[in-house]
Amino acid sequence: MNQKVKLGLIVLVAAGIIFLGYRLRNRAEIVAPINNSGNAGSETNNQNNNPAGEIGSLKPVLEDKLLAYLVGDQDVLGVKTDGRVIKKSSSKIEVLSDADFEDVRGASFSYDGKRILLEVGGYFKFFNTEKSSWRDLPLMSSPAWSPNNHDLAYISGGDTTYISLLNVDLSTFRPRNITRLDFEDTLLAWIDSGHLALSEKGASLLKTSSWAINTQTKAWNVLVYEKQGVSSIWDGKGNGLVFTSSGRGGTLTLVNNKGESLRNLEVLTLPDKCAFSDASLICAIPKDTKALSGSFLPDAYNKGGITTEDYFIEISLGSGEIISRFDPAQSLDATNLTLKGKGVYFINKSDGKLYSMGLKK
Amino acid sequence: MKRILLSLFLLILIFGANIASAQIRPQVLLTWKADSYIPKEYKGRALPVVGSGLKISVMVLDGGQFADISQSEINWYIDGNFYKGGVGMKSLSLDVPVGSPVVLRIKAQVSGYRDLLLSKTIEIPVVRPEAIIISHFSGNNIKANNASLVARPFFFTGNSHDFSYEWKVNDKDPISGKNDVLSMDLSALQDKSNIKVGLIIRNSGETASLVRNFIYTK
């Protein structure tokens, strides 16, 4: 081989290596998406034959205003705004916990519905449905249930803060610290059973970032890097839906567990108005497209300054195509969705009550 | 010749790998929190207003792990001007000063970690107190003769949140509406085609106002 050719080959290899180096460096800074488990609408694993109502017609499931609910195979659990826990089986309503609390701010169910987290005046406690007992939790913020056990991930309180894991079933609380954290105003969620998403709280005109944390290796990587209006949900199995904005309106993107974009969705709504099921995503979409496209999101909707009148669509996770569309007969503003069996369950933001609607499947 | 080529190749490989690792610079992360008021049900970000307390923290992400910068010199700058600094000063607390621009530019400079000079600048929007009117009807429609509107304050300062609410309906004082809920009886209104609702929220010298127009539809 001619020496010049050999030299040329060497230069090419060298250039390739240097290029690879730059790619590696940039990979750590690549933008890719994220966060926040919609725990209020989580569902148990088994499919069921829940009578969610006739196709297209709305059916009130519980008459009380709810903070969170969980649809099981045979029943529906709900946490009322005063912290009382109720269960509806067939047409019978049973009170699981009659304890009421002042200043209840939020609630969420563990993956199997057997533990219920309640935020009361900035403190957290959980209800064990098997023992019918409440127990106070250590000082924490942004707790999130694991997708497959009774671990809570949270940011510990106190002068030195950590991301910690706590199995609430242990008689003595022994949290496992994942990493020290000097972060402000962040949210935790489970991407999947081995990864947490840590996100700065987003706002329409504010650039924020999110990171994935491996709970075993404790390694971090960027999910979203300095995007406006970030808000997101994860299904606990590695599928994420991320909203970002650039002023008014915004874009919804399906992402994988590394935050890499799989596809942008052609519809405009917010992650909190969507829910994952096994192979699809169901979303409540405003009939008036200007309701969201003309607003600074997600702030305007979350503040309550705008309300929407929605229809539902089901989107294939595989192809991103809209599988079906369902128009409810009544006006509703749906949040905290759950797709279960042949129906969609949701809390109507207008009255805070849980409804279901039968879907054609 | 083959030996020379092989040696050259190995040299380039080692040199290239070193370049690659040297290029992965640690990443500086700045996060912040404002203590301005938001309603308890609001899950979004509390944005600062003039007078808000603001805490900014810095961390350094290096090779997928957070670095120990407790022995590093950390200097803080606001809008390009040195503000504070010191060894291990990983957070900065301040009150948003009167006369602040609409965006505060905060820079943290970390020196002494891996003999590098690292820095990061973020922009924090400074907003004004905000009043929101919540209607349970879709859009700007009101579909009942008896309708209620709810007021919500956002981004006020101070620990005392003794809000006062002033409502106007078509520029007149309503019969009911001294607190955060306005109950309207639309049957008393002659012109229902445009219902102008005004709201002023006050708290400790701060004021926010909003006007929303509604239409009565059966």
Image: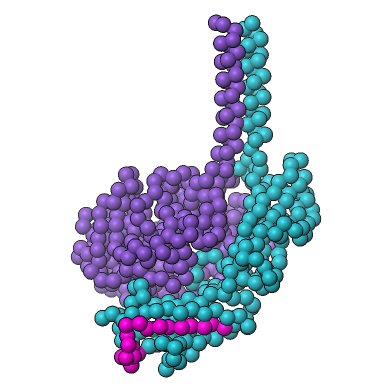
Residue A16 point in image, percent of width and height: 56, 25
In the rendered image, residue A81 lying in the magenta stretch gets the answer no
Rendered position, B82 above or below B207: above
Q: The purple chain is which one?
A: A
Q: What colour is chain B?
A: cyan
Residues B74 and A286: in front is: A286
Residue at (20% x, 63% y) in the render: A55
Colouring scheme applied when the structure was drawn:
by chain
Does A243 sit above or below residue B208? above
Res B148 seen here? yes
Residue B201 falls inside the magenta stretch: yes
Q: Nearer the viewer, residue B148 or A166?
A: B148
Residue at 58%, 69% (x, y): give it: B127
Magenta span of residues: B185-202
Q: Which residue is drawn at 25% across and 60% down?
A: A326
Query: Measuring 77% from the left and 45% from the top, which residue is drawn there?
Result: B112
The percent position of residue A323, horizontal first and vertical second, equals 26, 51
